[in-house]
Image (cartoon, coloured by chain):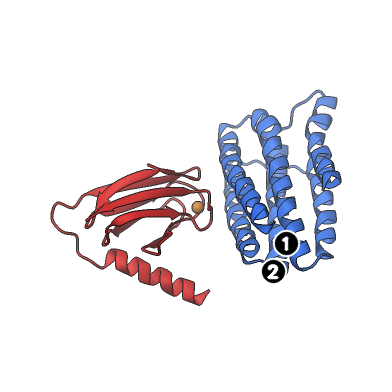
């Protein structure tokens, strides 16, 4: 848990690391790519949970995650199309995807209540990490006001998810 | 899945089935950024509630006591007529943090 969280923080701190090293802030195409990738990661985790979870509340939570993250990502796609921005892959997106794939494989080996708990704990930690990145890196770096606005909406939504996940985690104990 | 949907339909029907009496008021309850406002609203039996969802996500107004369960699609407004008095705690099934109270006088 602590190891995993620190890896997640490390992955996202590449945001500041890489950007600061180059003395340049993240560009909008990179920010769009990172935000979209972060959503896809949570959708994939939730789809696994819809199949594997045994607890009713956990299953319902997973369904909520798919519904909301797909809605936010659809908005993001519509926006980049409108702004004629092509999301640009970058080190942060790559690190996030790699770490998420590892996590998915790790969760894939668990079963029953152990899986439920691990999935929900990871959802708490993941949303926390993403929210911190949004607040401290992505939103301040975004230059287009519409992109900034969508990220701010996303932050509100993901803060709600974090609380929801914390609530579910507490109910599993 | 089916029973829930069936119940939802029933609840919606119950909310909308009775004709609006004269002098009935319309009150607006807005869902924006995953917050319901006002958090506490007052109305009377026969009044219409306009559920306004300003978010890009679907929300529900689901009564804890089962009196109503309305689903509001993103950027949509749904009207329902109140048919039963009571102080009703309700929440969003998709975002359980969204909670509010509707006081319905007879
Ligand atoms: Cu909701």
* Residue A54 numbered tag: 2
Name the residue located 81 percent from the left edge and 25 percent from the top edge: A20
Check if mark 1's residue and mark 2's residue have beta carbons within 8 Å: yes
Classify mark 1: residues with Cα within 10 Å, few (<14), some (14-19) or many (20+): many
The residue positioned farthest toward the bottom in the image shown: B2
Residue furthest out toward the left: B22
On the image, the x and y values in percent for residue A19 come to 80, 29
Q: Which chain is red?
A: B
Disc 2 within 8 angstroms of ligand 1 (CB): no
Q: Residue at x 31, y 68 (%)?
A: B14
Residue at the image position 50 percent from the left and 76 percent from the top = B2
> Where's residue A130, x and y in %?
70, 41
**Which chain did the image draw in blue?**
A
Image quarter of residue A83: top right
**Is B64 placed left or right of A110 in the picture?**
left
Q: Secondary structure at mark 1?
A: helix
Work out whether residue A163 can be spotted: yes
Q: Is residue A96 above or below residue B65?
A: above
Q: Residue at x 83, y 49 (%)?
A: A99
Q: In which quadrant of the rendered view does residue A134 lie?
A: top right
Vertical order, A47 against A5 (above or below) = below
Chain under disc 1: A
Discs 1 and 2 carry the same chain letter: yes
Position in image of residue B13 (x %, y %):
32, 69
The 10 Å Cα crowd at callout 2, few under 14, some 14 to 19, many 20 or more, is some
Residue A46 versus residue A7 in the image, above or below: below
Helix, strand or loop under label 2: loop
The residue beneath circle 1 is: A116
Q: Quadrant of the C terminus of chain A?
A: bottom right
In front of the other: B28 or A57: A57
């Amino acid at each position: 848990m602590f190891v995993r969280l620190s890896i997640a923080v490390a992955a996202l701190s590449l945001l500041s690391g890489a950007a600061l090293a180059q003395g340049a802030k993240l560009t909008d195409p990179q920010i769009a790519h990172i935000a979209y990738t972060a959503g896809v990661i949570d959708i994939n985790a939730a789809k696994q949970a819809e199949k594997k979870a045994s607890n009713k509340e956990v299953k319902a939570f997973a369904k909520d995650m798919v519904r909301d993250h797909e809605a936010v990502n659809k908005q993001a796609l519509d926006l980049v199309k409108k702004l004629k921005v092509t999301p640009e892959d970058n080190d942060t997106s790559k690190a996030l995807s790699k770490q998420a794939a590892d996590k998915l494989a790790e969760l894939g080996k668990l079963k029953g209540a152990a899986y439920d708990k691990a999935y929900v704990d990871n959802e708490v930690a993941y949303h926390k990490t993403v929210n911190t990145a949004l607040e401290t890196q992505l939103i301040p770096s975004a230059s287009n006001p519409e992109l900034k606005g969508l990220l701010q909406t996303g932050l509100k939504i993901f803060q709600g998810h974090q609380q929801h996940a914390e609530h579910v985690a507490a109910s599993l104990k | 899945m089916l029973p829930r949907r069936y119940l939802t339909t029933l609840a919606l029907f119950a909310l909308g089935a009775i004709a609006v009496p004269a002098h009935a008021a319309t009150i607006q309850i807005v869902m924006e950024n995953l917050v319901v406002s006002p958090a506490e609203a007052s109305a009377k039996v026969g009044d219409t509630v306009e559920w306004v969802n300003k978010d890009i996500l679907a929300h529900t107004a689901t009564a804890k006591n089962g009196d109503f369960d309305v689903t509001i699609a993103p950027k949509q407004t749904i009207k329902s007529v109140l048919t039963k008095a009571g102080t009703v705690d309700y929440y969003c099934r998709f975002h359980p943090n969204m909670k509010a109270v509707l006081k319905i006088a007879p």
